[in-house]
């Protein structure tokens, strides 16, 4: 189960896009969907980026990365002026707007505010499974029916006081390039989005719904179906060869990680593993107090620099029965490093964990969930399983205890691995309530080794 999020409150003048377009929770039907996310918090700017990856749709992943990275890089370079409006902040969020064996649709929302920054816009990309091509939104349209579509847009827009008809007319004169975010509402209408200041003097982007009848291309019909009745694309992923298998080393040696599984049997009990990343920090003690008071065990994926700075907190985590996780030395995207550097990131962190606790971690969480064959091979070689997650409340994005609570509680399920960050006070504050709620629902809260009983080195785990 994966969250998808719209960019920010106030989008579409109070209309919540997710209710109109994404109510189907399309991500739920896509087996193996994962999220690449990255945050960069500096005194002079904050950037938060995330986009989904769909197994087998490599060209889509590349297209999304190419759409997001330059925007974030440019923002970090140019937006560094803190004003009364606050620290310049960029959020790139995503929604899955269609999924089927024919096509996958991803909408990216870019929001900039604070400092001198102010912008809001969306792009939608549609992946053609058959050809493996990533197509722009306009591929959904029958080019012979453009005049008809523009007429419908202008007709609907004439009832919308926020839209400036003159601006709209000029914008549509740009022909199809003017339409870069097209999706479908839950009723099957075409959802057309305009960027901030394109068709309105308002400061927020605008989306409108028009009838999709007769204006779609053949591919557009498939896209509409993928939005209305989403199904798992189940794109064929090449069989791993022995050389690049995730679990090659593990298969070779037949070695299996078995940690003390305690007395819980998660094959019968309803178990959830709470995991906390990026610490430990001094404030982690408050979270440990909450866990201790409820007799609950969790897993901490620790960054080496913080292990070095807070060895007493690491020792406490260990002494109180929580599982030790390795989140690398300084949180790089491992997929951008060579094998030796990946190994060094993990080993140096484990050296510090061992110095603080006497034990090495056998649980690797690659930063941003970014892994590949090289990372998997190093993990396998080091006897470590890769622990990803399937519930992500994106607590780093909102810094709001109530939002974190709502997202965790509404997406919790038997076998879930829940990702949160103990470096945020808002997250730490949320967990007393969350734990009480989950316990009240009959869940047993366990460590990652308890959730699985045994783990295979190198292998990736998203849930049980
Ligand atoms: Zn992290």
Image: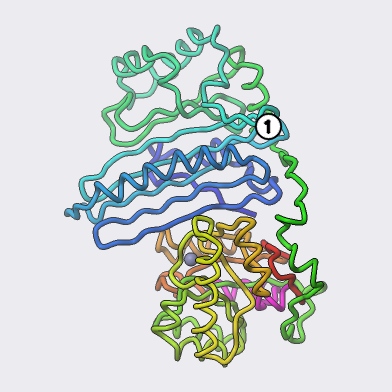
Residue at 45% x, 13% y: name it. Answer: 150
Magenta stretch: residue 368 in it?
A: no
Give the vertical position of 176 relative to 348 (above or below).
above
Where is residue 213 shown, x and y percent of the image?
Answer: 61, 15
Tag 1's secondary structure? loop
Give the vertical position of 208 relative to 274 (above or below).
above
Q: How many marks?
A: 1
* Quadrant where the C terminus is found in the figure: bottom right
Residue at 71% x, 78% y: name it. Answer: 450
Residue at 59% x, 41% y: name it. Answer: 23
144 left or right of 449 in image: left
Magenta stretch: residue 450 in it?
A: yes
Magenta stretch: give its range: 433-452
Q: How is the image coloured?
A: rainbow
* Quadrant where the N terminus is found in the figure: bottom right
417 left or right of 143 in image: right
* Magenta stretch prevailing secondary structure: helix
Residue at 64% x, 29% y: name it. Answer: 128
Residue 320's quadrant in the figure? bottom right
270 left or right of 351 in image: right
273 vs 15, nearest the viewer: 273
52 vs 158, nearest the viewer: 52
- Residue found farthest to the left: 84
Residue 11's quadrant in the figure? top left
Where is residue 258 shown, x and y percent of the image?
Answer: 75, 80
Q: Would you name the residue on which mark 1 appears? A: 129
């Amino acid at each position: 189960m994966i969250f998808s999020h719209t960019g920010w409150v106030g989008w579409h003048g109070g209309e919540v896009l997710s209710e109109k377009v994404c109510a189907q929770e399309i991500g739920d039907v896509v087996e193996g969907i994962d999220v690449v996310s990255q945050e960069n918090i500096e005194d002079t700017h904050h950037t938060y980026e995330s986009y989904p990856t769909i197994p087998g749709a490599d060209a889509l992943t590349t297209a999304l990365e190419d759409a997001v990275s330059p925007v974030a890089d440019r923002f970090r370079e140019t937006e560094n002026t803190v004003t009364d409006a606050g620290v310049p902040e960029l959020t790139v969020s995503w929604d899955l707007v269609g999924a089927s064996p024919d096509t996958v649709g991803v909408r990216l929302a870019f929001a900039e505010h604070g400092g001198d920054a102010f912008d809001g816009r969306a792009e939608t990309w549609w992946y053609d499974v058959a050809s493996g091509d990533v197509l722009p939104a306009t591929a959904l349209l029958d080019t012979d029916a453009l005049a008809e579509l523009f007429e419908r847009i202008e007709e609907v827009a004439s009832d919308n006081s926020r839209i400036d008809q003159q601006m709209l007319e000029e914008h549509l004169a740009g022909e199809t390039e003017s339409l870069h975010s097209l999706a479908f509402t839950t009723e099957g209408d075409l959802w057309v989005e305009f960027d901030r200041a394109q068709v309105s003097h308002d400061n927020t982007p605008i989306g409108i719904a028009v009838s999709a009848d007769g204006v779609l291309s053949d591919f557009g019909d498939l896209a509409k179906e993928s939005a209305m009745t989403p199904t798992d694309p189940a794109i064929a992923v090449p069989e791993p060869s022995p050389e690049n298998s995730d679990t090659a080393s593990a298969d070779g040696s037949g070695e299996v990680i078995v940690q003390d599984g305690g007395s819980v049997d998660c094959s019968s009990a309803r178990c959830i593993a709470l995991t906390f990343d990026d610490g430990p920090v001094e404030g982690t003690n408050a979270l440990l107090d909450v866990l201790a008071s409820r007799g609950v065990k969790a897993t901490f994926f620790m960054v080496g620099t913080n292990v070095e700075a807070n060895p007493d907190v690491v020792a406490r985590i260990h002494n109180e029965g929580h599982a030790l996780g390795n989140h690398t030395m300084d949180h790089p995207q491992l997929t951008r490093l060579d094998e030796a550097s990946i190994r060094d990131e993990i080993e140096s962190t484990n050296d510090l964990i061992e110095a603080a606790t006497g034990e090495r971690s056998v649980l690797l969480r690659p930063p941003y969930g970014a892994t590949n064959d090289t990372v998997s091979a190093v993990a396998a070689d080091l006897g470590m399983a890769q622990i990803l997650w399937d519930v992500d409340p994106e607590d780093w994005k909102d810094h709001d205890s109530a939002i974190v609570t709502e997202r965790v509680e509404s997406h919790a399920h038997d076998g879930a691995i829940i990702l949160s960050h103990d470096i945020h006070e808002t997250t730490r504050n949320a967990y007393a309530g969350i734990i009480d709620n989950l316990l009240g629902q009959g869940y047993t809260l366990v460590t990652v080794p308890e959730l699985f009983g045994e783990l295979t080195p190198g292998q990736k785990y998203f849930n049980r």
